[in-house]
Image: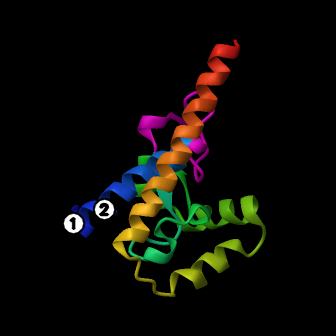
Amino acid sequence: MKSRKNIVKELDRVFSLYIRHSHAKDGMVECCTCGRSYPVKKIQNGHFMSRKNYITRWDEENCAPQCYGCNVMKQGQQYLFAKYLDQKYGDGHSDKMLIKSKKTIKYSNDELLEMIDKYKNRLSTLCMSLISLIFAL
């Protein structure tokens, strides 16, 4: 039986892989705040609202690929991230994420494990689609 800390760590890892790979085109991913392209392995999963808020930590509409410079060195470029989210999901989306992040939620270990399975399955589907494209060439 894994500890809660290890379950959260595994979910963070799988979710990050999913976010980065789901935005990739030909192995490259664009940073949502500066627009530069990076290989999937060199980009991070950025969060508009902080990871400390579990309710938005694994919310796909709160996350997008970000380069190390924007995500870490420039503290997430929150203003530019908000503009990106509003452009992608519609005006006011960043405000909705802010409001949502103020709510609290306590996920059970089983719920976290279900999310791990969900994102592992989505990653598997992405990989299978990529393999199909390669063999179609």
Residue visible at 21% across and 62% down in the picture: 1
Name the image quarter holding residue 95: bottom right
Q: Nearer the viewer, residue 3 or 99?
A: 3
- In the rendered image, which residue does mark 1 sit on? 3
Q: Residue furthest top?
A: 137
Q: Which residue is mark 2?
A: 7
Image point (42%, 36%), residue name = 41
Q: Amino acid at mark 2?
A: Ile
Q: Is residue 132 left or right of residue 50?
A: right
Kindly identify the residue that appears in the image at 38 percent across and 69 percent down.
Answer: 110
Looking at the rendered structure, the secondary structure element under dot 1 is loop
Q: Is residue 68 above or below residue 110?
A: above
Residue 127 falls left or right of residue 89: left
Q: Position of residue 60 (x, y in %)?
A: 58, 61
Q: Position of residue 93 (x, y in %)?
A: 70, 72
- Can residue 75 be seen by looking at this rendering? no
Q: Judge whether residue 32 is colored magenta.
A: yes
Task: Please report the bounds of the magenta region as a residue range.
Answer: 22-43
Gap between marks 1 and 2, in whole Å?
Answer: 6 Å
Q: Which quadrant holds the C terminus?
A: top right
Does the magenta-highlighted stretch encompass residue 59?
no
Indicate whether 11 appears above or below 37: below
Are the residues at dot 1 and dot 2 in contact (C-beta closer than 8 Å)? yes
**Residue 64 visible:** yes
Tell me which amino acid carries mark 1.
Ser
Tell whether 59 sits left or right of 112. right
Q: Position of residue 28 (x, y in %)?
A: 56, 32
